[in-house]
Each structure stands twice: as C-alpha cells, then as structure tokens.
Image: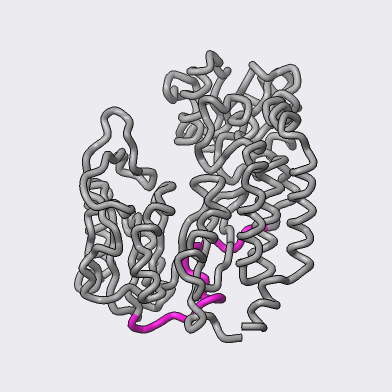
Amino acid sequence: MKEDHVMLMAPERSEQLETALRNIENEAIDTARIREAGKFDELAGPFSDSLVLFGAGPLGRNTLAGLRRAGVEPLTFTDNNPRLWGKDVDGLEVLSPDEVCSRYRDSACFVVTIYQGSDVRRQLTARGCKRVAPFPALFWKYSQIFIPTNGIDLPHRIHSVTAEIRRCDSILHDQASRRELCEQLIWRYWLDYDALSAPFDGKHTYFPLDLLTPLTEEVFVDCGSFDGDSLDSFATHWDRKFRHAFAFEADPANRTALASHIEAMGLAERATIMPYVVGNLNGPVSFACSGSAGSHVSSTAGASIVEARRLDDVEWPLPPTFIKMDIESAEPEALLGAQQLLQRHHPILAICTYHRSEHLWQIPNLIHSISSEYRIFLRRCAEECWEGVCYAIPLSRLKKA
C-alpha cells in the first residue's frame, strides 16, 4: 500500500495541476465570464457575424441550426469532401475549400466545425485565411444555445469544482493520467491548444493492453454497442480468445446492424444482444433513436420509449470481467446502477469521460467511491477532449512490468 501511495502522489505532476488551479482560482469569476463570452469575437475580429463553417457533417449541421436560433446566418459551408461541393446542406450551399478561400479569406471568420480540427485549421492558415476559430469558442459565445453539449462547458463553472478536481488528481495512478487531467483543465479553461499533448493511438481506445492483462475467459459487457465496432475491436485485441460478450444496444436500427456484424464476425454463439439502455433504473425511458452512435436518453419530442436496466439487476449467466461504456453522457447513472456488481466482481472498466466536461473528474471520483480496489487511469485517443476514457483496473489485472 505504501508503494501505491507514493506513486499516486508523484509531486511533479500534482504541482503542475496545482499551479493551474491556483491560476483559475486567482481569476475573478466575473473576469472569467467576460473572457469566455468574448473569446470568439477576439478570434474573429471584425468578422464575428460573417462566418464560414468548415465541416458540413453532423457537428456542422448542429452548429448551423444553433446559429440560426441565435439569428445568425453563415455565409456558406465548406468541406474537404468533394461529393458535397455545389450541394445544399440544410439550405446552406457547400463550396470547395479553393473557392471559399478565394472568395472569403479576407472577409470572413472560418469556424472549424469538425472534431479533431487541427489539420483543417492549418490548412486554412496556409491558404491565407486571416481569421480561423475552433467551434468551442463559438459555443462559448452562444452558450445559451450550445452549452453544455459536445463535451464543452463554460470555463467559469470550474471555479466551483476545484476541490473535486484535486480529489481526482490524488487518486490517479500514473503521471500520464495526471498530465491528461492537467492539460485538459488548461484547455477547457483557456482554450489553450498548445497545452495538449499528442493523443494516444485511437486503435486502442477502449483496450489499453499496455495497462491491463487480458483473460482468455474474459466476459465482456459492451454498453453502447452501436453497430458492433467496439465488439469487433475487443475480439481483435483479445485475438478472439474470450468466453462471452453481452452487447447492450437500445436503438432498433443499430441492433439490426449489430446482429449482422456479430454474424459476420462468426461470434453468434459467444455474443448476446441486450436490447436495453444501461442506467440506474429499470423500466421504460425516453430515447432518441437516430440509427447512429449518437442515440441517447432524451426527453425531446419524437423520442421513442425503450427499456432501461441496472447492471446490478441483470441476471448474469456469467459474471462480467470487463465493462466498456460509451453511452452519450449516461455513464455516471450507469455506474451507480452497477455498484454491487463492481464491488463483488471488480471487472475492468473503460468508461468514456468526454460527453460532459465535468465527467473528466466526476467519473474517476465516482468509481473510487464505489470501490477503492481499482487503479484509475485517464487517457485520450483523439484531439482536444474527444475519445477521453477512464480506465479502472483491479490490482490483479494490472499489466506486469
């Protein structure tokens, strides 16, 4: 236990976090509010109402809809996908990057509405575009419409949770985890992209074999199984040597794709589809079925009614040894609904932290409060905050040095 305590309190990383937290606490909350509200206009300069949206996918479309609610009509979309050029997306024309840069490089702000947008920001700067902004700054400006969403929240709210962040730092098991917590805090508070280290390899998002020891009798629980992509990745990482998988997916269209994928992988005898939302209650819930990875619990008009289950109340024919959750911000509720399971069996956990800003520290703290047997790690497998995961690994399953 003493060795673990020394590792948990590695001073060089905690000192960096403490410096960042003190800088936050020393900024008056009203100053933080003014800074976050003005960040986009600072980046956009005189073109804060003359906007080009780079990225006509789901994020771009959602941004367009939000701007229209705010009374702002962008000039155009642009996108690197040539199949979209010359077409309308939600009533807005999509121009090629060459054309839009030629037309607007000196008279508009280009808002990058794609995840992992660093390459596009460099592309626009190289083409001479004077004003380029990442979408989080725009979301801060129109916070009444966009916040909280897509893992983005307002910086001033961090003032009220510094104790929780310090608690999270104290339970993280290695320096890479502390670095991630600190760098994420700096990015989320000041939108400082230079503070972020390179992400880990996205091929291993849920399955960090450098941290854990796999079992040939693994029983995998895939919460938010979508079309089976993470189940496929699990089978590949385990070289198909596992006992069984339980795939939770509430969206009917996704379940159809999931069943086909399981059949194509030859796993029909070792995979069970569970048609439920995972949460902290049993019974019907309102659920937005989009036929995509973004299906989620929602009370909006037009949502479907699906069944929810607590993992504690599932009649498991085999006790889970590994649980993954990517369930669109419902992770804390699902963990609360699995407390007895975690305390009894201590399955490895791979829990997404990026759907809500506060989940970065809340989820590690919650897991630690459920069971102190876990060693807790933070990793990020994409740019900015995307594909952030908390891994909780019991001591018996830690990778041996």
The percent position of residue 252, horizontal first and vertical second, equals 22, 47
| Magenta residues, start to end | 198-217
Against 221, is 148 above or below? above
Depth order, front residue of 126/13 = 13
User: Residue most toward the top?
Assistant: 71
Q: Relative to 184, is 5 above or below? A: below
Percent position of residue 363, x then y: 51, 57
**Residue at the spot x=52%, y=71% of the render?**
208
Q: Up-down: is 17 above or below 302?
A: below
Q: Is residue 43 visible?
A: no
Horizontal and vertical percent position of residue 267: 25, 71
Query: In the picture, which quadrant includes the C terminus?
Result: bottom right
Position of 24 compared to 338: left or right?
right
Left or right: 8 in relation to 53: right
Q: Nearer the viewer, residue 31 or 137?
A: 31
Depth check: 341 or 123 in front?
341
Image quadrant where residue 262 sits = bottom left
**Depth check: 366 or 12 in front?**
366
